[in-house]
Amino acid sequence: MTTYIKPTKIKIYINSARKTMAQVKAETGCTHIINGGYFNMSTFEPVCVLIADGVIHVYEWNGRGYCFDTMPPVLRWSTREDKNFIYGVRLVENGQAVVPLDYNAAWGGAKRKTAMGVMPDGRIWLYCSDDLTTPEQLQQIALASGVDSAIMLDGGGSTQGDFNGQTVTSDRIVHNFICFWAEEDSKSGDDIEIRQSFLTKNDCYKEGKTITPKGIMVHSTGANNPSLSRFLPGDELIGYNKYNNHWNQPGLSVCVHALIGKDKNGNVRIYQTLPWNMRGWHAGGSANDTHIGFEICEGDLNDANYFRAVYSAAVDLCAYLCKLYDISPDNIISHAEGYQRGIASNHADVGHWFPKHGKTMDNFRADVKDKLSAQTAPVELTQEQFNEMLKIGLKQLLGI
């Protein structure tokens, strides 16, 4: 599970009373909580730099991690002046992958993972999953989330988290937690929410090839089932796949970067299923090497309300990706257009659906352009707002 939050407070909780995660969350009243730094399970003592509320719990290694004395946290080397600091294996720094990854051999391999990062706008990215993931795969997940920096925290049996009621649990009692009090559940783009359910067991994900995204390809599933749980194992939000016919398993020849469809309550949501820069299996041609591909879950093709909702979500997703990878909206195509250009297999989507509601791919590209323009348009002030800002500025300048 993944979330993006804007916290008003962050606390490193030293679990000397050996409480469960649920007990710590109830005691502190935090909205989000994850397991924290590495510790020795035999001695129940931390093994890396850990400073909480000014108390140094271990300082034998001048490690690198997050200092929580500022908001947002700062990724840097620890100092004795820090009041709150936790070590983590650096995954991303300054928006770039840290190469090589430097971690203890015991922390490697495919295990449950916990991570946190800071977005360029200061929001906090939290990741906690019981999927079996290597540090290298976790690094790709962090990069795909758009973080400016990120660290891997303790994992394996220690991995546990509660994101405002969405949980990954463990029987292990851990030495420390990181508690967050979220001002709001923030969104992963300018105005959209993108949840993650990576298809880690799909052969495409295991292949692990990466691309530099140059375009986006729009697909639709060709099946009258708008439920995201048809294609994903599921969670508490979208419901669970009861028939084991989802895409998170080996032996399938398809894997996209995202899905748009309904959760269990009928709300339209976006789920990212691959890191954006991972080579997907969606086009059946060379577009796999250049394009991010996502599927819109088809329902009743004549359902105007559902179409408007998924169309709007698709526009938002494409605007987010265009901004993230500097992709021109002109390089957004449908699967059918990809076939016409000789870079995709012979499929009709989405040309069999969009025209039923008065939309073409030209309309879609234009709507993405409009969305991007709206996001970058300067804010216009009224005369009253300008006068008030001028008054405040003069008072600050004159010290009155």
Image (spheres, grey):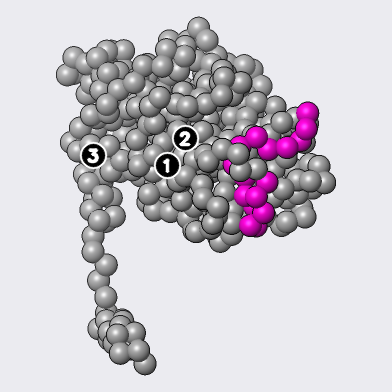
Residue 393: % across, % down:
30, 83
Q: Is residue 37 above or below residue 386?
A: above
Residue 15: % across, % down:
75, 45
Tell me if residue 70 is in the magenta stretch: no
Q: Quadrant of residue 111?
A: top right
Q: Is residue 314 above or below residue 14?
A: above
Give whichever of discs 2 and 1 has the lower sequence position.
2
Residue furthest to the bottom in view is: 400
Q: Which residue is mark 1?
A: 149
Amino acid on which the number 3 mark rests in the picture? Asp
Between residue 205 and residue 85, name the one nearer to us: 85
Q: Which residue is mark 2?
A: 90
**In the image, what residue occupies the spot 67% across and 54% down?**
55
Contact between labelled residues 1 and 3, with CB atoms less than 8 Å apart: no
Question: Disc 3 or disc 1, which is closer to the eye?
Answer: 1
Q: Residues within 10 Å of mark 1 (few under 14, many from 20)?
A: many
Tell me if residue 46 is in the magenta stretch: yes
**In the image, what residue occupies the spot 61% across and 21% down?**
106
Q: Is residue 15 above or below residue 350?
A: below
Q: Is residue 182 left or right of residue 359?
A: right
Q: Residues within 10 Å of mark 3 (few under 14, many from 20)?
A: few
Q: Quadrant of residue 8?
A: bottom right
Contact between labelled residues 1 and 2, with CB atoms less than 8 Å apart: yes
Secondary structure at badge 2 equals strand
Asked whether the viewer can see residue 185, the reply is no
Q: Is residue 378 left or right of residue 224?
A: left
**In the image, what residue occupies the spot 65% across and 57% down?**
53
Magenta range is: 42-57
Q: Which mark is residue 286?
A: none
Secondary structure at badge 1 equals strand
Q: Which residue is mark 3?
A: 326
